[in-house]
Amino acid sequence: MRLSVLFVALIVVIAFVGSALAVPPGKTVEFAGGAQGKVMFDGKTHADKGNKCNDCHTKLFQMKKGQFHMKKEDHGSDKGCGACHDGKKAFSQKDEANCGKCHKK
């Protein structure tokens, strides 16, 4: 019986830790963005477009802070953000006019 309770408690703790690492709607997370300026990810903007956390996590991005490092050559590819930001599903990363939509100086 004690083992069952301990097991259930462990599962609950793991579930809360996973959700604590996510960026919920209304919150932002900041990434270093090099010369173009830092990249701001807004959970609300993506949720308002109908996206769910599981659409990207863990298919494209791990749920551990600091795991994702996008390189300049990744822009316009299907890696990371480019999986959706391809000019069809969402604005394109390839179009330099869109840089300021993510990068903030």
Image (tube, rainbow, N blue to C red):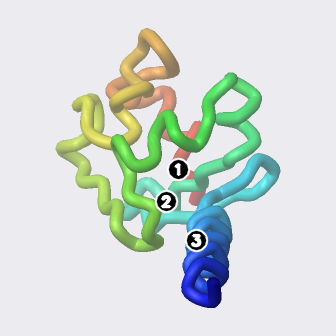
User: In this figure, which residue is indicated by the disc labeled 3?
Assistant: 11
Q: Amino acid at mark 1?
A: His
In the image, 28 versus 96, the foreground residue is 28
User: In this figure, which residue is indicated by the disc labeled 1?
Assistant: 103
User: In this figure, which residue is indicated by the disc labeled 2?
Assistant: 37
The mark nearer the N terminus, 3 or 1, is: 3
Q: Position of residue 6 (x, y in %)?
A: 61, 85
Residue pictured at 45% horizontal, 47% vertical: 57
Inter-mark Cα distance, 1 to 2: 5 Å
In the drawing, does residue 54 fall left or right of residue 43?
Answer: left
Residue extending furthest toward the right:
26
Q: For mark 1, does the 10 Å Cα neighbourhood hold few (<14), some (14 to 19), or many (20 or more) residues?
A: some
Q: Amino acid at mark 2?
A: Gly
Q: Amino acid at mark 3?
A: Ile
Instruction: Report the quarter where the N terminus lies.
Output: bottom right
Answer yes or no: is residue 17 visible.
no
Inter-mark Cα distance, 3 to 1: 37 Å
Quick check: marks 1 and 2 in contact, CB under 8 Å?
A: yes
Inter-mark Cα distance, 3 to 2: 39 Å
Q: Secondary structure at mark 1?
A: strand
In the image, 100 versus 17, the foreground residue is 17
Q: Position of residue 63 (x, y in %)?
A: 46, 62
